[in-house]
Image (cartoon, rainbow, N blue to C red):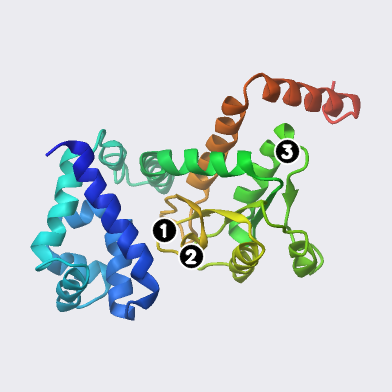
Amino acid sequence: MQASTHHDRHAALIAEIQARYAQFSPQFQAGARYLVDHPDDVAVSSMRSIATRARVQSAALVRLAQQLGFAGWPELKSIFVERLRTRPAPYAEKAGALAGKGAELVAEVFAVQQRNLAATECASQAALQAAAGLLEAAGRVHVAGFRAAHPIAYTFHYLYRLLRPSVQLLSGQGGTLEMDLRALQSGDAVVVASFAPYSSEALLVAGRARQAGCMVVAVSDSAMSPLARQAHASIVIAVDSPSFFPSIVAGIAAVESLAELLVARAGPEAVQAIAAAESQLRELGAYAP
């Protein structure tokens, strides 16, 4: 069987899980989320160890496999084994080897960030292209991210605005988020960033965007996150950290990549727009001489 067929089977399985996720029991949801977020672990680990990490009973994984149309766990696991054997490049493993080298916290932090970046790069290629297409086709673009995810949203807003001055940041400053959401219209696109624990404001923005007929681009930590499940394009970022707080490094890299991709796809027009913006900033005294 060709590699593309293996990946097609895995993609079809993930699509089915996403479509049925809301109807699953809590145990099934926990197991399904682990399958989607940790495909390499599923391929190489025992069912018992996966159940422990997912915090479900082993029997729940067997029943989940049967709910998804497989005879049992081994048949479901084979999909993940095939994917692992045929994927194009083991970026995550190479970066993961860095983790744990050196006992000092600084070394550990940088190693984990390397792994986050590699994992996000490996997982986000298709999603970034899809997101770029949605934003290019949108009448207007809005960006939102709150609390810890705000730097991710603000970075994308700042960069994309150099190319597209009409981009709006939904900040909700002064408690006016509901007023900001009135601006959403059919044909717009909304980029929303959040990761667990998910911001209630981010979910409000995504829900309102769907109601208004907007296309939603999610930047979150799981393809099964409540934000991703409302999105038309979902960019999944790794947020692991040895600290008490999730990391935003891969999220920043993802939105920088998205902005650069939009510039590259726009061609000469983008270059002219950015040159005009830079010239205006200099004239306004934004940069020190």
The image shows residue 272, relative to residue 234, as above or below, that is: above
Amino acid under disc 2: Ala
Q: Nearer the viewer, residue 107 or 163?
A: 163
Residue found at the very far bottom of the displayed protein: 25
At x 53%, y 67%, the residue is 198
Residue at screen point 70% across, 23% down: 269
Dot 3 lies on which element? helix
Work out how far the residue at label 2 is from the one at label 3, CA to CA, in angstroms: 27 Å
Say which of marks 2 and 1 sits in front. 1
Q: How far apart are marks 2 and 1 (CA)?
A: 9 Å
| Mark found first going from the N terminus, 2 or 1 | 2
Identify residue for label 2. Answer: 196
Q: Residue 161 carries which label?
A: 3
Q: Which amino acid does label 1 sit on?
A: Ser
Tag 1 residue: 222
Label 2 Cα neighbours within 10 Å, binned few <14 / some 14-19 / many ≥20: few
Image check: 237 left or right of 207?
A: left
Q: Quarter of the image holding residue 180?
A: bottom right
Q: Are marks 2 and 3 in contact (CB under 8 Å)?
A: no
Instruction: Find the distance from the CA under tag 1 to the CA under tag 3.
Output: 27 Å
The percent position of residue 134, horizontal first and vertical second, equals 57, 44
